Amino acid sequence: MAKKILVVDDTDWNRDLLVQLLEEDYEILQAIDGAEGVRMTEENKPDLILMDLGMPVMDGWEATRRIKANGALKHIPVIAVTSHAMVGDEITARDAGCDDYLAKPIDEDALLRLIKKYLA
């Protein structure tokens, strides 16, 4: 059975890019904001989450904090995939509970290496 990856991003183009890159090897779920990402994580228990940080409704930092605060979900790796690439943004993402961090534009090889690392 294919591993499930939840892609949480408010930009259609970014989600589509990740789906095209990953759908051959993984079951892909999609959420358009942090609140939907938290709900879908609770309902579907994905094996990995790719989390944008800057989103409306609920941002990725808060969504990650809520997922990591839930004992039934905190084991799920969260990789921040974000255009927040200033000095300190990675530290802030990790402080919120992100297990790893990848700046946009996405380096596809680096992303695939991170996914394999967490889903091995």
Image (cartoon, rainbow, N blue to C red):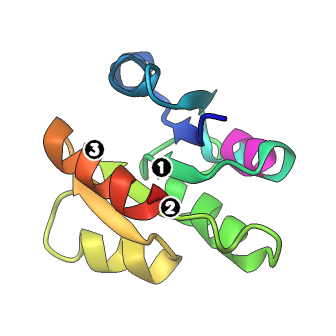
Identify the mark nearer the N-term, 3 or 2.
2
Residue visible at 39% across and 57% down in the picture: 80
Q: Magenta segment, which residues?
A: 36-41
Look at label 3 and name its amino acid: Leu
Percent of width and height locating residue 63? 63, 59
Circles 1 and 3: CB atoms closer than 8 Å:
no
Q: Residues within 10 Å of mark 3 (few under 14, many from 20)?
A: few
Q: Quadrant of the C terminus?
A: bottom left
**Would you name the residue on which mark 3 appears?**
112
Task: Decide if residue 31 is in sight here.
Answer: no
Question: What is the CA distance from the residue labelled 1 to the residue labelled 2?
Answer: 7 Å
Residue visible at 43% across and 46% down in the picture: 52
Circles 1 and 2: CB atoms closer than 8 Å:
yes
Say whether residue 25 is magenta: no
Task: Give the foreground label among 1 and 2.
Answer: 2
Q: Residues within 10 Å of mark 2 (few under 14, many from 20)?
A: many
**Would you name the residue on which mark 2 appears?**
78
Say whether residue 39 is magenta: yes
